Amino acid sequence: MKWITRERPKIDRIACPWLIRNFVDTEAEFIYVPANEVKEQAEKLNAIPFDIPGVEYSHYEDKCTFDYILKKHNLSDPALQTLAVIVRGADTDRHDIASQASGLWAISAGLAHNTKDDHELLQKGMILYDALYTWAKHLQKEKHTQNPVDHVFIDVYNKFIKQKSAQKKTPEWVKELKQIIQDQIDTNLTLTEISKSLDINPSYLSREFSKHFNNLSFGDYIRKLRIEKAIELIQEDKYSLTEIAYLTGFSDQSHFTRIFKQHTGKSPSVYKKEWQKSKTGTKG
């Protein structure tokens, strides 16, 4: 049977012919023509159009044509299912769904750039997908670093990275941010406002914050400091709990009590009584 699609293939229009010829139609002949001629030529040549809008063999929702062929022809081979996710990730720029997707895109793009004839490109692509299928079928659990010598290199590299990480200096913005937080712990601080003060993108600040603040989010770190400050004020025994809640930036007494208990396991009033009792016992 003849199959026809758009010229200059890269991912789906190479992967689909490989899939068709190996699992659907072993005698398949593939034709590449300009995109605006596919449907017209399909009728003239009695060919099945694929990977263009408005035909059966095409993309559906977040799936690509390779996925549709698997479903249409009931191809349940687990290796093909693995391959499908890689093809989909590469073909739809969703490299996060399969670690191999970005590699497949890079190789396919380079192959297409170096090979101007579509049929020659298809033949080279067939070899690529033969290799990917063999990996998916038999080699997924194997790693390149099976050799003991490879592990020696990796161990040395990891130690080097850890040493380099330990040597990294704390960014200046982290020091400045710590000072801002300490100075304004009793106010309603927000990352957006702070990012303006530091002249740092708020998304970057949010992403990097936990790396420099005990693996805590901005909100958790602020709450931790406020509770530490509240404990200091309780131990000074100069303020009521309502005053301490205000001085440490909590919106109301109940909010203060709830957060305090989350951090210490006790309500502020119980903590205060136990502290006063322990202090009296120490004097005796």
Image (spheres, grey):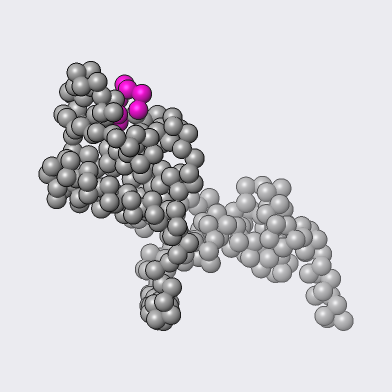
Task: Check the image and report above or below for 95 versus 53.
Answer: below
The quadrant the C terminus occupies is: bottom right
Query: Can I make out residue 243 in this image?
Result: no
Q: Is 101 displayed left or right of 110 in the figure?
A: right
The residue drawn where x is 40% and y is 56% is 135
The residue drawn where x is 43% and y is 80% is 148
Across and down, in percent, residue 269 comes to 78, 58
Q: Is 115 displayed left or right of 181 in the figure?
A: left
The residue drawn where x is 35% and y is 41% is 22
Q: Is residue 56 magenta?
A: yes
Task: Check the image and report above or below for 61 versus 208.
Answer: above
Depth order, front residue of 22/271: 22
Across and down, in percent, residue 241 comes to 72, 56
Residue 154 figure quarter: bottom left
Instruction: Please state the extent of the stretch shown in magenta in the rendering.
Output: 50-57
Query: Can I make out residue 251 in this image?
Result: yes
As drawn, the residue found furthest toward the front would be 27
Q: Main secondary structure of the magenta part?
A: loop
Across and down, in percent, residue 131 comes to 33, 54
As drawn, the residue found furthest toward the left would be 116
Q: Is residue 20 magenta?
A: no
Depth order, front residue of 237/48: 48
Counting labels gives 0
The residue drawn where x is 36% and y is 30% is 59
Q: Is 71 displayed left or right of 87 in the figure?
A: right
